[in-house]
């Protein structure tokens, strides 16, 4: 069952495979997909045991290699995520928020008198729940899927246009210059600490050599040991500064931005949005690149994951 599932990635197909070969359940009944899924998820097969909703290492010998069990469950999780993503055409679900009251925009739908389905994003403040309880009375009620999705595509086209993108590029350069200056300062600080550490070690070695090669009174030895202890404290401080500089430099390196990479991501997103048959890819790209999209009647505000500031685009619905 596990091997076949890894091959065809379908619990229903595995059930059909068994039934076609007259391989029945313990109750002499035919298999169904939910039984296969339940079996695949059972950690007992990989040597674990469950107690009060917690999973522990069992005492029995596993009959399925843990790596095979884990792979099967990764496939199940991936299929589950895919179903959630495919369930709705709400491309901006969990991304879009209301620009007036900051409530999330949630997908909803209604039917007109011709029984035609109308899908739209609805401000969370107009629904029952915590936003309603907070007494929010937002003026921005809803916007249709088509209108908002088209507006987003138009705005992305505007952002990627050379004339507009040049301002983003300049801002990225200014941001990177600031970060590089900070890195330069940390590099200088680290070099000074390394030089200081070198001098401290040399001095400490001199005191140790003197203790070994000369005879001193008990009082003099105590003073020398005291000085060595002081140098060891200074050595620790210098090492701490060096470690701190390395850590901060690594963190600052991660803040450096690439205008070319961001532009490339935008273009990929635009192309995915143009291809209707690649709607699933477009959804994934939006969730990968966008942190939030703030929606008002005359403005969209993009917060991309690639850059740490908002990009407002004036637009009318």
Image: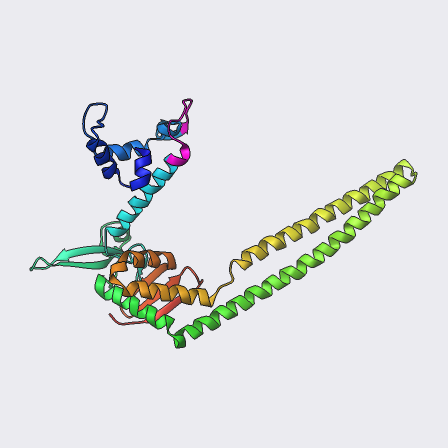
- Image coordinates for residue 243, horizontal then vertical, percent: 63, 51
Quarter of the image that includes the C terminus: bottom left
- Magenta highlight range: 56-68
Comparing 19 with 281, the one in front is 19
Q: Quadrant of residue 195?
A: bottom right
Comparing 166 with 231, the one in front is 166
Above or below, 59 relative to 152: above
Quarter of the image that includes the N terminus: top left
Q: Name which residue lies at 23% across and 39% down.
A: 13
On the question of residue 103 being in view, the answer is no
Q: Is residue 284 magenta?
A: no
Above or below, 262 relative to 104: below
Q: Name which residue lies at 31% across and 54% down.
A: 94
- Image coordinates for residue 251, horizontal then vertical, percent: 54, 56
Q: Name which residue lies at 45% across and 67% down.
A: 260
- Image coordinates for residue 204, horizontal then vertical, percent: 80, 46
Q: Quadrant of residue 24?
A: top left
């Amino acid at each position: 069952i596990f091997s076949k599932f890894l091959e065809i990635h379908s619990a229903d197909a595995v059930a059909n495979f068994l039934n076609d070969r007259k391989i029945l359940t313990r109750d002499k009944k035919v298999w169904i997909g939910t039984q296969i899924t339940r079996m695949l998820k059972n950690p007992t097969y990989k040597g674990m045991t469950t107690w009060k909703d917690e999973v522990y290492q069992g005492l029995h010998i596993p009959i399925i290699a843990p790596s095979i069990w884990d792979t099967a469950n990764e496939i199940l999780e991936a299929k589950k995520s895919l179903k959630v993503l495919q369930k709705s055409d709400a491309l901006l679900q969990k991304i879009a928020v209301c620009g007036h009251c900051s409530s999330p925009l949630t997908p909803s739908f209604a039917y007109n008198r011709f029984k035609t389905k109308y899908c739209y994003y609805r401000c969370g403040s107009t629904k029952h729940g915590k936003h309603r309880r907070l007494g929010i009375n937002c003026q921005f009620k809803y916007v249709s899927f088509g209108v908002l999705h088209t507006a987003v595509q138009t705005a992305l086209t505007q952002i990627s246009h050379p004339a507009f993108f040049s301002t983003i590029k300049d801002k990225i350069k200014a941001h990177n210059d600031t970060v590089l200056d900070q890195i330069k300062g940390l590099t200088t600080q680290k070099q000074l600490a390394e030089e200081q550490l070198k001098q401290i070690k040399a001095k400490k070695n001199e005191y140790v050599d003197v203790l070994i090669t000369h005879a001193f009174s008990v009082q003099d030895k105590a003073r020398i040991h005291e000085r060595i202890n002081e140098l060891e404290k200074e050595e620790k401080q210098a090492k701490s500064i060096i470690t701190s500089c390395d850590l901060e430099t690594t963190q600052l390196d991660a803040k450096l931005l690439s205008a070319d990479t961001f532009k490339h991501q935008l273009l990929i997103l635009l192309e995915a949005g143009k291809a209707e048959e690649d709607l699933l890819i477009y959804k994934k790209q939006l969730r990968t690149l966008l942190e939030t999209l703030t929606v008002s009647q005359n403005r969209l505000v993009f917060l991309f994951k690639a850059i740490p500031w908002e990009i407002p685009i004036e637009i009318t619905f």
